Amino acid sequence: MKFLCVPCDKPMELLETKPPEGGSIALVYSCSDCGYEMAMLTNPMETQLVGSLGVKIGPDGEKQAAAGASKCPFTGVVQSMEGEQKPAAFPWTDDAEQRLANLPDFVRPMAKSGIEKWAQEKGYPQVDGRVLDEAKDFFGM
């Protein structure tokens, strides 16, 4: 996927990136011929979805894309997040895990992470059926 300058019909170049702030990525693309610029902002869920697909985000991802390993436009966008320490796993009851398994595969990691974050912010010690019901109402699902 490439971004094309509408007036020039030429591929735009990545001009500026802003690393994840609250999970969002900001990108600015520019046309080298006419100077036309466009910006793209991903929300935290989109950023997480890209990560859950196994896309390498950061300088290493950019090198892989140059070698033809990835065609994702997000590859190489922000500083590598691989060095970040991952939080300890948040506990889920068996019932909650079974309910989570009913979600489509591509949505499951994003939903799990969002529910865990919400539950932690609410002070719950684990995700159970009651927490899932409350989260469902909160997120309007």
Image: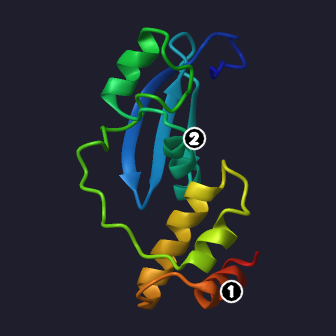
Q: Which residue is mark 2?
A: 40
Figure quadrant of residue 61: top left
Q: Nearer the viewer, mark 2 or mark 1?
A: 1
How is the rendered protein coloured?
rainbow
Amino acid carrying label 2: it is: Met
* Percent coordinates x, y for residue 32 in the rendering: 50, 13
Disc number for residue 125? none
Q: Earlier in the sequence, mark 2 or mark 1?
A: 2
- Which residue is located at x 31 percent, y 44 percent? 81
Q: Is residue 94 above or below residue 57?
A: below
Q: Is residue 23 left or right of residue 111?
A: left
Amino acid carrying label 1: it is: Asp
Q: Is residue 117 above or below residue 82?
A: below
Name the residue nearer the viewer: 133 or 5: 133
Q: Is residue 95 above or below residue 1?
A: below
Q: Under tag 2, what secondary structure?
A: strand
* Percent coordinates x, y for residue 93 in the rendering: 53, 80
Is disc 1 surrounded by few (<14), some (14 to 19) or many (20+) residues within 10 Å?
A: few
Disc number for residue 133? 1
Position of the N terminus by quadrant:
top right
Q: Residue furthest front?
A: 94
